[in-house]
Image (cartoon, rainbow, N blue to C red):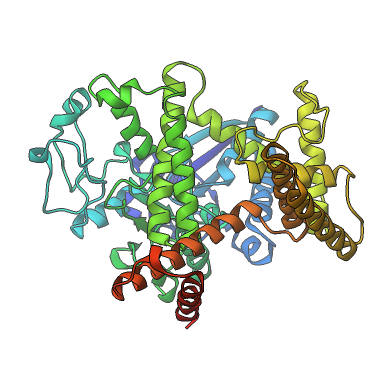
Amino acid sequence: MSHLLTILGLGPGDPNLMTREAWDVLTHARVVYLRTRKHPTVSGLPAHLALRDFDALYESGDDFAQVYAGIVDEIMAAARQGDVVYAVPGHPLVGEATVPALLQRAAELGIQTRLVSGLSFIEPVLERLQQSGVSSHKPEHRSQNAEAQIRDTEYPIRNTASAIRNPKSKIQNPKSFDPLDGLQICDALDLAALHHPPLNPDWPALIAQVYSRAIASDVKLTLMNQYPPEHQVATVTGGAVAWLPLHQLDRTDRFDHLTTLYVPAMSATASFEGLQETIAHLRAPEGCPWDREQTHESLRGALLEEVYEVLTALDEGDLSALREEMGDLLMNLIMQAQIATEAEEFRMVDVIAEIDAKLKRRHPHVFGDAVVNSVGEVLTNWNAIKHQEHVEKGAARQSALDGIPPTLPALAQAQKMAHKAERAGFQWSKDPRQAAQMRLAKVREEIDEVITAGDNTHRQEEIGDLLFTLADLADGFGIDAETALREANLKFARRFRAMEAMIRQRGLDMQALSLAELEAMWAEVKRAEAS
């Protein structure tokens, strides 16, 4: 005879919110297993019930996975002997790690199961937020009809079937908390274990079971990898809604096993998906004629230009410019992906999946069980994995120089070649000091050959050799030659402009100045810069 395992939801914490079905099951049961007795509804259960809880497992277990495994084992052992009623907070299928495992084990053992629904934590939390006057959803994109905007609320939303048919005429309801309209839900323990939140910042989120300051602290750190420290969030504990900046989340004691954290949407589009939508819209039939005409090839020059503008911002230490230029570069990359999507070549999800898999594959010491003791060992593993990848693709490289992009700037390309050749064994010396001396001797040799060259054709060749040798010299010292030259260019331009300004202020003419006078002014500029 097959036994029956009934998994019952106790609701969010008020005995009055239990369902009629749940009450009927409890009325006719004799024994009920509780995942935890620490739930307000337990005090309102029928008086005749014999209650057995697993709270002791929480005290003795090393981690939650071990606790949940122990609960599943005990419930299944009891279910083999007879009918069992197992009661959990909220709804059995919302935030209950033991329930999926029980359902799977029961199916494997041929034990019948019955789910008895309970009101989850979600609905009461949304009611508390609604009653507190909080609005829940993201603002409309700025490009939409201004008359459709609700300007006196921070988080207007989009809702209704007509909005789906005509996005430009959406009826917005800032007081709606419909989970079907973008609300995200996750568990605090899962979030605390991550380094970056799997949340879209354009939509609000509920984070359940923030039961302690320790968990709140870990959740805060994860969220702050995406949300600014001053982003306002709310804790919902019982009937109380308390607002505070994200960075102060763990500086309060407003936590128990029923606490939920509400994270509103950012006030402007801030998600990768939101930017993809903007660019897809630009490429759509009703979008921008210029954007619609772009191809992979036509964007090549702009892509290269944006890379150099990012480098310029880095060189100048201008973080505001860096943020802007990174956005321009990202826009170009997403535009390339959108063009590929429309041509059914690949999609952004393919790009992300491929690089994510590559990073995890090439870091087995982080995402696997490999052990490394130095950066050198990391690089050795990295190169071995890259080689194996090329073999598996049927594109094993025949030369150590294979794979160097031919479009790299010449100086960067020279250093890359010198570096790869040395790594392959073509090296000056295994002793770093001796190798540095040999590189310097080679530089002097190349300078002499430039001086003794008989004509410009020969001199051009020798200057090329000299530049290559200088790139190799930089590589030997671990210096990026391209960056070094770019910084030297910036330094020269800065000093030259300062000297031009000095000459103008003194009413002089650079062309009329002697070399000695120019050198004196140059030295004066350098002293002023140093001070």
**Closest to the observer: 81 or 518?**
518
Residue 426 at x, y percent in the picture: 88, 44
Residue 168 at x, y percent in the picture: 16, 30
Q: How many marks?
A: 0
Residue ID at (45%, 56%): 313
The residue positioned farthest toward the left in the image shown: 147
The quarter of the picture where the N terminus appears is top right
Q: Quadrant of residue 403?
A: top right
Residue 491 lies, with reference to residue 253, above or below; the image says above
Residue 32 at x, y percent in the picture: 54, 50
The residue positioned farthest toward the bottom in the image shown: 531
Q: Quadrant of residue 439?
A: bottom right
Q: Is residue 213 left or right of residue 370?
A: left
Residue ID at (28%, 64%): 241
Residue ID at (54%, 60%): 487
Question: Does the rendering let one see residue 295?
Answer: yes
**Closest to the observer: 176 or 77?**
176
Residue 242 at x, y percent in the picture: 30, 68
Question: Does the rendering let one see residue 28?
Answer: no
The residue positioned farthest toward the right in the image shown: 430
Residue 28 lies, with reference to residue 428, above or below; the image says above
Q: Is residue 456 left or right of residue 133?
A: right
Q: Quadrant of residue 358?
A: top right
